[in-house]
Image (spheres, helix red, strand yellow):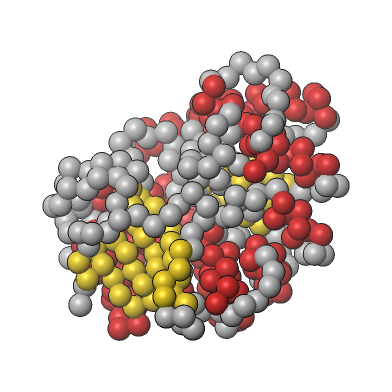
Amino acid sequence: MVNTTQTQIIEKRLEYTDKYFLRSKEILEAENINPIVRYQVFARRDVAELEGVDEAAAFIKNSVGDRGKVYTLKNGQKYATGESMIKMEGRVQDYIDLETIYLSITSGALTGDVDLDALRQGARDIYQAAEGKPVFDFSARHFAPHLIPEIAKICQEEGFAGTSTDIGAKAWGNVGLGTTPHALFLAYKAHMEQNNIDGNPTVEAAKAFDKHITKEVPRTILGCTFNRELSDIVETAREGIPVSGTRIDTCGENYTEASQNVKLPKLNVSKKYKQGKGVTIASVWGLRKGLDNADLGNLKLFVSSGFNANKTTAFIEADKIYQKMYDKPLFDAIGTGSFGLKNLIMTTSDICAYFDENKQIWIPNSKVGRTELPGDRLEEIL
C-alpha cells in the first residue's frame, strides 16, 4: 500500500511533477493528439528483492482507472536489469504526467535510506566543479516523493540555479523549469505515422510548444530522441521556430550523430568522458561545432545525463579549451540528479510502442537505443 505521506503527495502530485511533463500534456490536449502507447519501466541494476513496484503500479492504475492497463512485477521478486518491472498501455494524455511520481516511488523504495549530508556534499562538489556555469536540479524522479522539496532546498543552498518541480522551486521563490521530454516527440511520431502525416516529429512538437506555451519559457528543444541531435535542431530552427537552445541527453546505448569523426584536442581527463556512447565531450563538441557551422552559434547548449563532480570537471576543462580555440563556450548549463551517490538505484520510464488503431497492431516506437524490453513475468492489475 502507498503510505500516508505518499498519499498526501499524490493528492497534490502536480506540484511534485517535472514541469516538462505538465507542459507536454498541455500541448497534447491543445492539439488533440492522444495515441494509444505502451510505456515500460526498468532499472539499470539488478535487484535482489523489489520494493516500491506494488505502490507505483497502484498509483498508475488508480490514476488511469479503466482507461488503461497496467502490468507489473511484485514487491519481493528478484529483478534483473534488461527486463521491465512495469508496463502500461493507454492514451498518452492519461500517462504523460504520471512519470515523475511513479519513478520517484520506485527509485525511492529501491534506494532506501538517503544520506542527505553526502547528497549535499555531492551537490556542492558539482556546483564548484561547474565554475560558474548554471547547474539545475533534475532529481525528482530519482528520490522518494517526500524528499523532493528537501533535496531542492539543499540544491538551492548549494548554489544551483533552479529545479524541475513547482514544489522544489519554492526554495528559489520560483516555479519548476524544463521544456520538452522524449515522450512528447514520441507521442507526435505515433500520431503522425498512424495518420499518414508527413514531417519531422521533433519539428512539429517544437512548433506546438512555441504555439501553446507562454513566451516567458525558453524554447529549449530536446534534439536527441531520434539520435539526430544536430540535424533535428537545425531543421527546427530553419522552420522559423524561435529556438533559444537545445538539451542533449543521449542515452548510453547510442553514439551521438554529432560525435562521428570528431577529433578532440589533448585533454587531461578520463577516457570515458572523452568519447564513446551517451553524452561525451566528443558528442557535445561535435554538436557545438555543427550548430556554429549552421549559423546557429547563438543557441544555448544544455547538457545532462550522469553529471557528477568528476564528469562536470572533465567537461569544464574541455569548455576552457573550446573557449580558447573559438572564443565561445562549449556548453552553457548543466542538469543533474544523481549527485554521485553510490547506492542510488534509478528507475527509468520510456514509451516503447504505439497501437495503430487503423491496422490494429502494436508498432515499435521508442527513442533510438531503447527498444522494448521483455515482460514475460508481468501480471496485469485488474
Left or right of 327 in this view: 81: left
Q: Is residue 304 above or below residue 86?
A: above
Instruction: State the quadrant of the N terminus.
Output: bottom left
Count of marks, rendered view: 0
Question: Residue 212, how many percent across, how many down?
Answer: 67, 75
- Residue 304 found in image quarter: top right
In the image, is residue 108 above or below residue 13? above
In x, y percent, where is residue 172? 56, 53
For this rendering, which residue is in front, 6 or 353? Answer: 353
Judged from this view, the residue extending furthest toward the left is: 76
Work out whether residue 86 or residue 22 is closer to the camera in this orientation and state it. 86
Q: Position of residue 164 (x, y in %)?
A: 52, 56
Above or below — where is 72 with respect to 283? below
Q: Is residue 231 visible?
A: yes
Q: Quadrant of residue 289?
A: top right
In the rendered image, the residue lying farthest to the right is: 295
Percent coordinates x, y for residue 320 in the rendering: 72, 25
Q: Quadrant of the C terminus?
A: bottom left
Any part of residue 172 in sight = no
| Front residue of this view, candidates 146 and 85 | 85
Q: Residue at x 45, y 68 (%)?
A: 363
Name the residue at 41% across, 71% down.
362
Left or right: residue 173 versus residue 12 is right
Residue at 70% across, 30% down: 262
Q: Nearer the viewer, residue 64 or 118?
A: 64
At horizontal 56% and vertical 46% (from top left) the residue drawn is 249
